[in-house]
Amino acid sequence: MWETRVTKLLGIELPIIGGAMQWLSRAELAAAVSNAGGLGIITSATFASKEDLRAEIRKVRELTDKPFAININLFPSLRPFSVEDMLDAIDDEGVTIVETAGNSPEKYLERLKRGGRIHMHKCARRKDAVKAEKMGVDMLTIVGTECGGHPSAEGVTTMVLLPQTIDSVSIPVVAGGGFTDGRALMAAFAMGAEGIVIGTALMATTECPIHESFKKALIAADETSTCLLLNSVKKPVRAFNNRTAQEVLELETACAPLEDILPKMKGERGLEAYRKGDLDGGVWACGQAAGLVKQSLPVAEYFRKIMDQAESIRCRWAKSE
């Protein structure tokens, strides 16, 4: 019923992909997304070694027999990170779907596509999507400025960026940045997307390995609860507007050097906050769609609500024809 080029390519039932979230996109959440009919994703950048990533891949396979993907972060990292090591683990474990993000994947194309592997690339600018298609990626995710994490410095919204990107490429495009429910899914379809990626809303799900205080904060949030950090250096990060985020913004306003700012944004600091439930303990990525998160549900139930709402809209449109 909801078949698109994306669902056929990935072998999934629903046109929904789980967002790649630092520290959170681990086996439990990835398996829950895959078991619910979507594509679960594990983020490789948060593993200390390829052996650790191998173990996580094996763990997710114990929890699901459905397709899943490994995200490879190509952003500059504050800690040593070997893309080659992560690709070794992916090769060794026979992972069939990979997602790259954050920079051009051109350097790694041969390995990414090895053995007929499906290569998704996530980008935040239309021109990067066009380049990625020319490189030979199989499908794209395009994220607007609403997204949590890393939007473009150009500040283009999903409503504007998505259709222009779709008009510029021929491969399937998944929409990201502000998508949480059936209304958003149908809007994405109307603009030509063939699926959506959901990140922020998954943080509130039962299976997400984050302290309950963060889930409650998301449910209490509204559309003004996030802010853009590092905009001053054209490397924006959309995060929850907490005390640490305000400290970063104050340093930016004072034109402080990056070496004074980056320690406040270290991923390890955010991980400790996630574990302790300290909402102000670090910078945590969060999209503007937080204002649409109303309850904490198991992933399967959450996805059913999305698809039920989408079907209701589709039926209403059909009746009006």
Image (cartoon, rainbow, N blue to C red):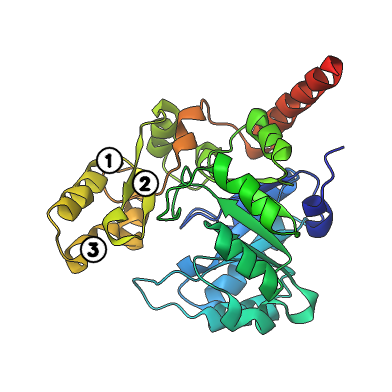
Q: Quadrant of residue 306?
A: top right
Kind of residue sitting beneath label 3: Pro
Mark drawn on residue 268: none
Mark drawn on residue 263: 3
105 vs 193, left or right, is left
Q: Earlier in the sequence, mark 1 or mark 3?
A: 1
Quote the CA–CA distance across marks 3 and 2: 15 Å
Quote the CA–CA distance across marks 1 and 3: 16 Å
Q: Nearer the viewer, residue 147 or 165?
A: 165
Q: Quadrant of residue 257?
A: bottom left
Kind of residue sitting beneath label 1: Asn
Q: Name the quadrant of the N terminus.
A: top right
Q: Earlier in the sequence, mark 3 or mark 2?
A: 2
Mark drawn on residue 242: 1
Residue under label 2: 239
Q: Which of the two marks, 3 or 2, is nearer to us in this view?
A: 2
Residue 47 in the image: state x and y as whole percent.
Answer: 48, 70
Residue 128 in the image: state x and y as whole percent.
Answer: 56, 64
